[in-house]
Image (cartoon, coloured by chain):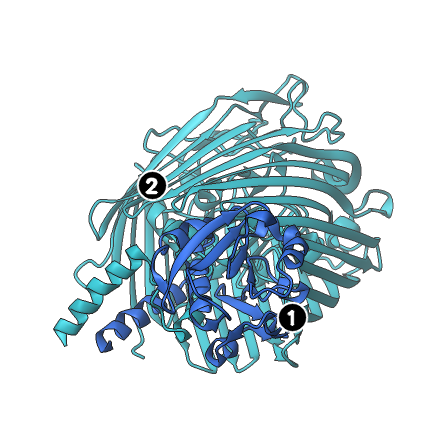
Chain colours: A cyan, B blue
Amino acid sequence: MLKIIRIAIVLIVLLSTIGSFGQDLDSLMNLNAFTQESELQKILNKNVAVSSKNGLTTRETPGIITLITSEEIQNSGARDMTDVLRLVPGFDVLQDLQFVMGLGLRGSWANEGKVLVMMDGQPFNELLYQTVAIGNRFPVDAIERIEIIRGPGSAIYGGSAEYGVINIITKAAESLDGVAVYGLGGFHANAVGRTNGGVMAAQRGENYSWDISAFKGNGIVSDQMYQDLYQSSEAQDLSKVTRADPMNINAGIKLGNLSFRTMYDQFETSDPVTFVSNKNFYADLRYTWKVNDKLQLVPQVKYYNQIPWTFGSRESGEKDFNARATRVLTQLDAMYDFSRKVHGTFGIVYFQDQGIDLLAGDLFDGNKTLTLNNFAFFAEGLFKHRLANATIGFRYEKNNRYGAAFVPRIALTKKIENFHFKLLYSQAFRAPSLQNINIALGGTIKPEKSNVFEIELGYQFTPEMLLSVNAFAINTRNVLIYGSEGEGDDFNEWYENSAKSGSNGIEVVYSIRKKVWYANLTYSYSQSIKDNTVATYEVPDQRQYVGFPNNKITLNTNFNLTSKLSFNPTFLYASARYAYTSIDPDENPMLSKLDPYLMANAFFNYRGLFVPGLNVGAGVYDIANVRPGIAQAYNGGYAPIPGRSREYVVKINYQINFKK
Amino acid sequence: MKYFKLPIMMLALCFSVTAHSQTTNHQVYALFVVNIAKYSSFPNLSSDFQVTVYGKSKVYDELMKQSGKTVNGHALKVTQAENVTELGSAQIVYLADGKSGSLDEILKATEGKPVMIICEREGLHKKGAGFSFIVTENSTLRFDINNTELEKRQIKISKNLSTLANSTI
C-alpha cells in the first residue's frame, strides 16, 4: 500500500509539472477554470454578503470593502474594537459626549446614524439617536470575521448606513462546533486597563444548529489625569473615575430553514461626573423559504427593546435622562435568479419605533411617548457580463414625520485576471431618529442625504500580493446637527439641518501574504469639502474637520517565528489634528493643533500550548507611550480624552471541538 | 494503469477543492482541447492533427507543450493564426476570447470543411462554433456543444464527451 502511495505522489508531482494531459474524461468535470488560490486569495475570494445580497467576492462586490479575519484580530492582540477599526483605512475613533467614543469615517464624524454596526445581524445603533458607542465593548476574541463597507450602504440597509457598514460575525454564530473560553487583561503602569472574558458554545448538525455565548468585562476609559475644558473642577485621575464595562449575551438556534437569534447587550461607561448606560435587547425570527430553484423568500420579524443613553450623576446615581426605545419590524426579502447572469433582490419593510420616557413622562414634546411609522421598499439587480458586473438598485423609505427618502445606487465592477475595478455611485441617507425628530428646531427636520462617488482599481502583482487604490467624493446635504446652549434649567438642545458637509480623498491598501509572514499596509488621505457649512466641525483655514487627521498610515504585520509562535507588530501613524483643548477669556472653546503621532504595538502569540486549542498571547500596546488623545469630533465642550498610557496585554483562549 | 488512476483522481481532487480561484488556468483549457480532439473523429485525416489558435491566448503556450505528441495516432501540430488565410489545414481552430468577433469570418472560411471551432468565450456555440467554454458558478470549466454544426462538418464526437456537455444544441 505504501508503495502505491509513493508511486502516486511521484506521479502527482510529475503530472503537475508536465501537465496532466492523460486525464480521464470524467475527471475533467472537476477541473477549475482558475489557478489555485494563495492564502491571500482565499481571503479576497470569500463571498462577502455585506455589500450585496448576491454574494460576490471582495474584489467584485459593489462596495469598497475591508475584510478582517479572526486570525488577524488574534494575531494583532487587539484589545477592543478601537484597535481593530483604527487599522482600517479611513476609520477613526473620536469622542462624542460624556467620554462616549464613536466612529469617524473618511474624515467626517459618523457616529450618529452614519455608520451601521451589526453583530450577528443585530444593529447596535440605538434607536433614540442612532449612535454606537465603541471602546471596550465588543468581544473581539469571539469574532470570526468583520465585513466592512467603507462607503454608503443605505440602498440595502436604510437610514443608518449613510457613510459605512460594519458587519461583525461571531465564531459561535458562524463556525464554532464545540466550546470555547477566552480572557483578556490589559495593565497600565498604575492601573488595570481592562479585564474581559467570555464563553461560547455551539453545535452544528445537518439540519440544525444552536449557539450561545456570554461576554463580560470591566475597564476604564483612560488611566491619565484629565482637566475638563472649563476647568470647573480639579484635574482627575481617570483610572479612578471612569468605567467602560461591557456585557453581551447572544443565543441563536436554527431548525431547518427557521432561525431565531436573541441578544442582550449592555455597555456602562462614564466621564468624571456623568455615567452613561446603553442596554439593548434583540429578538430576530426569520424563515428561509426556497420556493423553487430560482426564487427564495425570507420573511422576518424583529423586536428591539432598548434603554439607550441613560445618563446622570456618577456620584449619586441619579438619572437625568432615562427613556426606552422599541422597534417592531417585519420584512420580506425575495431573491430571484432570472438567469445564470441576472439576479434580483427585492424587499419590503415596515417598522414602528416608539420612544417612552421613563422619568417625568414629558420627554417627547410634553408627552410620554413618541411613535414613528416607517415603510420601505428596496430592489437591486445584478447583471453579470464578461466586461463588467452591473448592480443597479434603490431604496425608498417613507416616515410619518419626516417624509420620504429615495436613494439609488449604480455600480460597475469586474475582475479581469489580475486586475479589478469598481465604479460606484450611491445616494445614501440618514433617517432622523426619535430624538432628532423630538427636539427638532422649529419642529421640522429633513433626512440627511449624501451623494457618494467612488472608484477603486486593484492589481494582483503575484498571487501573494495585492495593491488597491480608491478615491472617493462624499457630498452631504441637510446635515443633521446637534446644538445646545445654557446650563441647568436654562439648558436647551436641538437638532437642525445644516446645508452641506462632506469629504473627499484616497485610500491605498497593499497586502502581502507569504507562508510565514503577512503585512497589510494602508494609507488614507481625506480632506473636508471647501464649502462645508457645519461650523461645529470646522477648523478655520484648514481642509480637515475637528479631531481628524488628513493622513493616516497603518501597518499590520505577522511573522511566524515557529509553527506555533508568532510575532505581530502593528503601527499607526496619524498626521496633525485639531481639537478643542482650552477656552478663551469669554469661555469660548479654542482650537489647538495636536502633534502627529506614531503608535507602535507588538504582540506575541503561542498556539497549542501544552494541548491543541490552548492559545496564549502577550504584548504591549503603545510601546513608546505616545498616548494620542481622543478629541471630541465637534465643538461640544469636551477636552480630548487623554490617551491611555502603555498597556501590557495578556490573552488566553481555549477551544474544544465536539467530536463528529 | 491501476497505479495511474489514483494520482489522476487525486490531481482532479486538488483542482476541484478550489472553489473561487484567481487567474485563468490556461493549462486546463488546453487539457480540454486535447481531450475534445481525442474523443472526436474527423473525416479524411491522413497527416498531422493540427490545432490552430486564432488570436492571442496563453492556451497556445500550453498547447505548444504538447506539440509532437499523438492524438488518436496522429502527431499533434500546434500553430497560431492572426487571420483566416493562416488557418491552413487545421482540424481544430481555437478562437481566443479577444478575437471572438472573427467567428463569422472563420465560419465562412471553413464552411463545409471538417474544421471544429472551439471558442474561449461563453455562448458562441449558439453562433455557429462547435464548442464554447463556460465557467460554472463553482468555477469549474465546462463546455457547450453545437451538434448541428459539427454534423454539418462531418465531425463525430463520442457519446462520453457529449454527455459531459453543459448543454447541447
Asked if residue A494 is positioned above or below residue A215 in the image, the reply reads above
In this orientation, which residue lies closer to the viewer: A376 or A519? A519
Nearer to the camera, B166 or A505: B166
Label 1, label 2: how many angstroms apart (C-alpha)?
41 Å
Task: Give the vertical position of A233 relative to A305 (above or below).
Answer: above
**Dot 2 amino acid type:** Ala
- Please tell me how crowded label 1 is: few (under 14), some (14-19), or many (20+) other residues with Cα within 10 Å: some
**Which residue position holds label 2?**
A191
At 53% from the left edge and 28% from the top edge, which residue is drawn? A551
Q: Position of residue B65 (x, y in %)?
A: 35, 52
Image depth: mark 1 or mark 2 in front: 1
Could you say whether the residue bearing mark 2 is in a helix, strand or loop? loop
Q: Secondary structure at mark 1?
A: strand
Specify whether B126 is left or right of B42.
Answer: right
Q: Position of residue A163 (x, y in %)?
A: 65, 45
Q: Which residue is mark 1?
A: A302
Residue at (30% x, 36% y) in the render: A189
Q: Quadrant of residue A538?
A: top right
| Residue A365 visible, this angle | no
Residue type for callout 1: Lys
Relative image position of residue A116 (x, y in whole percent):
62, 52
Please give the name of the residue rendered at 56% of the width and 38% of the height, measured from the top-left corner. Answer: A95
